[in-house]
Amino acid sequence: MSPFELDGEGRLVHLNAKKEGPADGRVLACDLKIAATISNDILISFHGKLRLMMFDQDGEPRFSKMGAVEWDHAFRGMVVAMKQPDNTTVQFIGVTVKDFTFFAKKGGKVELQFKAQVKPDKGQFEALGQMLLADGMRLTVHNADGELFNTEDSAAAAARALHETAKADNATITVLTTDGAGNVTDTVTLGALTPEITAQMKTLGSAEAAKHEDDRDFERGIEQAYKTLGLSKQFVDEYLAELQDAYTQGWESVPADL
């Protein structure tokens, strides 16, 4: 599953406040229901087949009478920030976002709703109340990245420098680890996601989708695509959304009833 990231216009739909903790140390906690209407590309963050199920190749809802699609998954340790037009901003770190609901919209859009569990201070709680009354806000949601330590050993530093150099040159570098007998024990692909790799992912997606319908398997196919191109786990993890999107474009280019 891809990392869940969102940056766009959203709105606070509902706020449920409660007390948590022991009687002598209770704190305010809130369940926020948040909504945003964004590109259906966000569906790739949840499953490679989800966009294909909900939308046709022209980006229109596949089923006009289909209601909400619910998705039971929780992303933990997230950063959720909400900013009003007057620049009033609240940000919460270490948030659990869950209980996702998707509504297919015309024009390749999807309305996404989810819950966020937060513990606001007094000022943040008052700001949330104002956001509940507002028409819209800028919403950003992403994984909480951060270095625990500011030092790294020489091997890690060398790997990081090599990776950054490859990115700067818009190239990929494959590093082979061998044992004493010269046998390759590990392959790591570093650097940039080049147009060539993206094109190859689309081609492999089309090839998998062109198989008989009963033999089509998105997850198995995309895993094989990574292996076919010799992409390491590090490279796939860094460019997961882009690789999945390219493969999905190839997959969706072949009719499901071929």
Image (cartoon, rainbow, N blue to C red):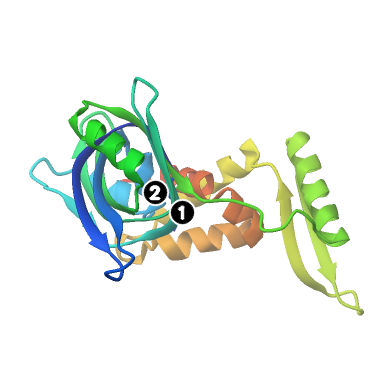
Q: Residue furthest bottom?
A: 181
Query: Which residue is pictured at 38% across the width and 63% down the height?
Result: 217
Query: Which residue is pictured at 36% across the width and 61% down the height?
Result: 216
Query: Which residue is pictured at 32% across the width and 43% down the height?
Result: 122
Q: Is 248 left, or right, of 85 in this rendering?
A: right
Front-most of residues 219 and 29: 29
Residue that mark 1 sits on: 2
The amino acid marked with disc number 2 is Ile
Front-most of residues 242 and 103: 103
* Residues under numbered marks 1 and 2 in contact, where contact means CB atoms less than 8 Å apart: yes
Residue 128 image point, x, y percent: 28, 38
Q: Is 107 left, or right, of 161 in this rendering?
A: left
The amino acid marked with disc number 1 is Ser
The answer to which of marks 1 and 2 sits earlier in the sequence is: 1
Residue 18 image point, x, y percent: 21, 57
Up the image or down, 129 lies above or below 85; here it is below
- Residue 59 visible: no
Up the image or down, 6 lies above or below 4; here it is above
Q: Residues within 10 Å of mark 2 (few under 14, many from 20)?
A: many
Q: Quadrant of residue 181?
A: bottom right
- Residue 142 visible: yes
Front-most of residues 4 and 44: 4
Residue that mark 2 sits on: 44
Q: Is 63 left, or right, of 233 in this rendering?
A: left
The answer for how far apart the CA atoms under marks 1 and 2 are is 7 Å
Q: Residue furthest left?
A: 65
